[in-house]
Image (tube, rainbow, N blue to C red):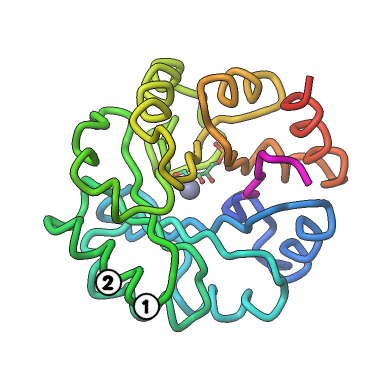
Amino acid sequence: MSAFKISPSILSADCARLGEEVRAVDEAGADYIHIDVMDGHFVPNLTFGAPVVRDIRPVTNKPLDVHLMINPAAPYLHEFANAGADLITVHAEADTHLHRSLQVIRGLGKKAGVSLNPSTSETVIENVLDSVDLILVMSVNPGFGGQRFIVSQLEKIRRIRDMIGNLPIELEVDGGVNAENVASVIDAGANVIVAGSAIFKGDDYHETIGALREAINN
Ligand code: DX5
Ligand code: ZN
């Protein structure tokens, strides 16, 4: 198995056939399933709640990578954990008490992630590195699939890779990643790639996920 992981974002899936879509990306080689939870307040869009996570849970054995773009997130962490999330990522810009949220997620037996919007400096996570399992760098402003990758985030990814050093923390990048730019994202230090439109735009997910892996390995 590759050292790099691909986490297809079901935001770009056909939600009328969500179970089939999850099964299809699972069979096509997804490492994680990325679920974008939006509240119409922290981001200008609404998507899935914990019941959707619960319904997806029996469809795949792949880890469910739940990205909470909600504010507050703290009151809902138990709900997403109980629904079957494996990895729960909160935004550093959302709830005031980031450290507490990360502790709660770990206390629920889940992996704890923290995400940074494009305008947020990595310095805000310096003091929680011992409490995170994953750092998620947004390379678009969160809210929608199909946006263009913000190139300035590559330098931030490099700085975070340096911050991580030997710590057991995954570095995930989300937004506008495709077969053309994925190599630069990996080169900057990411090891988990979220891709929505780049995967779901085609009919053959073996092919679209394969194209990403090929671009990573070349
Ligand atoms: C954006 C979401 C992303 C989105 C990525 O707010 O967090 O996960 O689905 O979609 P693409 O890959 O199309 O930019
Ligand atoms: Zn996401």
Assess whether residue 2 is covered by the magenta stretch.
yes
Q: Is residue 213 above or below residue 57?
A: above
Residue at image point 42% right, 43% down = 136
In the image, the segment drawn in magenta is 1-8
- Identify which residue, 58 or 130, lies in the foreground: 130
Q: Which residue is mark 1?
A: 108
Q: Which residue is mark 2?
A: 104
Q: What's the amino acid at mark 2?
A: Val
- On screen, residue 19 versus residue 155, left or right, reads right
Q: Secondary structure at mark 2?
A: helix
Q: What's the amino acid at mark 1?
A: Leu
Label 1: few (<14), some (14–19) or many (≥20) C-alpha neighbours in 10 Å: some
Q: Ligand 2 near label 1 (Cβ, under 8 Å)?
A: no
- On screen, residue 217 versus residue 80, left or right, reads right
- On screen, residue 51 versus residue 186, left or right, reads left
Determine whether label 1 and label 2 are within 8 Å by CB. yes
